[in-house]
Image (spheres, grey):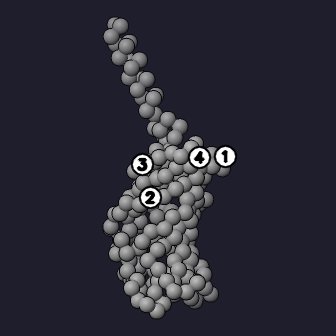
Amino acid sequence: MKKYILLFVVFTTFITVNAQDMLPINTSKSDIKWSCDYSFYFSGHYGFVKFKQGYFTKTNDKITSGSFTIDLNTIQATDMEADGNKGLTNHLKDPDFFEVVKYPTATLVITAISYHDATSFEAKADLTIKGITQPIKFQAELDFEKKTMKTKFKIDRTRWGISYNSKLKDNAISDAIGFDVTLSL
């Protein structure tokens, strides 16, 4: 009988110590702003795209991982007048850029987190765009009172096969795409 009690105590302690919670994001309050500059001009394009779904995994009161799906059908350009935004938005959905008909979503899976302090960390993640998965890193800040995580980072779009106007001298689009992300629970 003592063996069974000891096994029960060890088992329940193990489960309690390694308790994991999935924390779904609120997609209507979370947002992704994107920007891309011209290589040789002080201007560029910007807009937004929305999350389809996502969650953080919390282990022992710390965020330890997460998985997020971005709905590329929602990508919008917002830096020009209406007709210009509509034309650029449609072009971003073309095979020149995100090929949204074939690849309607992108995913970001956080694989490791290294905390700097209680509210800031570096995340390692796998980002999948157009069926191509590449590792990335970014810094993030948590605000427990507001239940948000914020980050800003850039990627080299050519790593995901997005090379439209990449190597042209005049009117070349920078290879870097910037993201300003707020995730809300």
Instruction: Label 4, secondary structure: give it.
Output: loop
Q: Residues within 10 Å of mark 2 (few under 14, many from 20)?
A: some
Residue 173 position, x and y percent, is 47, 83
Residue under pointer 2: 137
Residues 11 and 163: in front is 163
> Would you say the residues marked 2 and 4 are in contact, meaning their CB atoms lie under 8 Å apart?
no
> Would you say the residues marked 2 and 3 are in contact, meaning their CB atoms lie under 8 Å apart?
no
Q: Residues within 10 Å of mark 4 (few under 14, many from 20)?
A: few
Disc number placed over residue 112 in the picture, else none: 3
Distance Cα–Cα, label 4 vs label 3: 15 Å
Q: What residue is drawn where x is 40% and y is 83%? A: 166
Is 51 placed left or right of 94 in the picture? right
Of label 1 and label 3, which has the lower sequence position?
Answer: 3
Distance Cα–Cα, label 1 vs label 4: 11 Å
Residue under pointer 1: 145
Residue under pointer 4: 119
Q: Amino acid at mark 1?
A: Glu
Q: Residues within 10 Å of mark 1 (few under 14, many from 20)?
A: few
Instruction: Label 1, secondary structure: give it.
Output: loop
Q: Amino acid at mark 4?
A: Thr
